Image: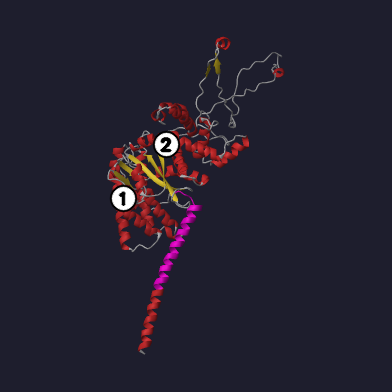
Amino acid sequence: MKNTEKSAAQWQEIVSEKDKEIAELRKQVDWFKGQFKLLQSKQFGPSSEKSVELEEQLSLFNETEALADLKAAEPDLEQIVYKRKKQAGKRELDFSKLPTEQIVHELPEGEQVCPVCGGKMHACGHEVVRRELRYVPAQYKVVEHVQTAYSCRNCEKNALATPMKKSKVPAGLIPGSGIVSPSLLAHILNNKYALALPLYRQEQEFQRIGVPASRQTMANWVIATHERWFGDFFQRLRSELLSNEILHADETTLTVLREDGRKATQKSYVWVYRTSGDSERPVVLYDYQPSRTGEHVKAFLTGFSGFLHTDGYEAYHCKLPPDITAVGCWAHMRRKFTDTLKTLPKDAREKHPAQTGLRYCNKLFELEAGYTEKRLSFQERFQARKEYSFPIAEEFFAWAKNEYDRNPVPKSAYGAALTYAVKQKEWLMHVFLDGRLELSNNRAERAVRPFAVGRKNWLFSNTPRGANASAVAYSIVETAKANGLRPFRYFQFLLERLPVGTSADDCAPWNDAAQDLCR
């Protein structure tokens, strides 16, 4: 009998262990279901993080009292604005920046006769009936540099030896590559780095029109340009970048096939650094590195002191020197809660506690939009944040810590959001240290996007030399765009000046010459 009771107890213990295992497996299944829904949402759903706010959000933050003295005074006079209805099918198009050619249509000579008296009629007015946009295909032409030889007629008749002189011919852009010109190389660079057209597609187009330019030849031109001129020019832009007090940083992956000591399948990285919105000389730089270690950030930012907008990656927090203050991204914080809600069934989203976290984040962004709309100065924004935004952020973190402590956080999207909030509080709160700081790191994320689009087209770099050349070319493109310049014109501008010794300062995108010729 004693053996039977012991056997029953053992079976009970086994059943209990199995129940725990089943419960844990169910949690894992729920987590995988949530991840599957999240991936579906990212692949097929809208990318916007805007959410429909619930009515109780207003009472949650006591909005009327909090914003009473921020609201602008109502106008004394009623303003009535009339809008004229557009004609169906008509659109107002602005062609002011394009050259215009007029085709004047006239009556045949024989029809310019008055139907009343039979006299000769004359043109008494013109009216533009239609404006159409005409495409003129790109044109390639061969430019031959002809050298002239000179000799002396007198010496030809009387002297034993005839002296000869030859005219000077400017050196080619790249020695040994006679066909490449600044405009051709600017066109190739613009196609790849501004329009995401890989070299093999450009090679195909060149073949169709009979231009002998292979992808390998073009790749060699790009690398040679980087090593001869663009690399030094990049350092000038880097010096300008580091002279700012506020920067943004982010990173993305890159595949490099032939890298010493590394497999082709290992990930390399391109780090993005850019100036903030208040900079008068915008700079966007890309830095290729074989890994994601924070030492690369520390090395690139040598000489910089100030605020650095980042995401929650640990390297930005533990590898930066003390004179650089990392500022967290509230857009990343909000995204954790939106991702949580995306993993849930629609009928369960409204009452889920993740909605509370999302409301807190949305309220901070609404306040920021209000500060911008009112065109507050940086000091005024600092004071407004201190009075209105800071208390909401403090309340948010108190709520998140309570949620985090009250429930042992399981492996779930909601648990990840709470963990992120608790661990990132220090850096997220740094946004309140200066009125010039921004609530998100979206500037850096937008700067990553052009590189990511290009990467989908050309897929990989063959060698580190090519990766470095590509990073610098993207830096020139995005810095040109940030300064209001057309990338093709700016590439041509640089390739016409840097090889003949024009200084980097005189070629900077904010320089008057660049603005006049490339804007």
The residue lying toward the viewer, choosing from 304 and 399, is 304
Mark 2 packing: few (<14 Cα in 10 Å), some, or many (20+)?
Answer: some
For residue 493, say whether it is visible. yes
Name the quadrant of the N terminus. bottom left
Q: Which residue is mark 1?
A: 318
Kindly indicate the quadrant of the structure image that contains residue 472: top left
Residue found at the very far bottom of the displayed protein: 1
What is the x, y in percent for residue 13? 37, 78
What is the x, y in percent for residue 507? 42, 29
How far apart in space, not on screen, are marks 1 and 2 (Cα)? 30 Å
What is the x, y in percent for residue 307? 31, 42
- Dot 1: element: helix
339 falls in the magenta region: no
The residue lying toward the viewer, choosing from 54 and 359, is 359
Q: Which residues are magenta?
A: 19-48
Answer yes or no: do the residues labelled 1 and 2 have beta carbons within 8 Å?
no
How is the protein colored in the picture?
secondary structure
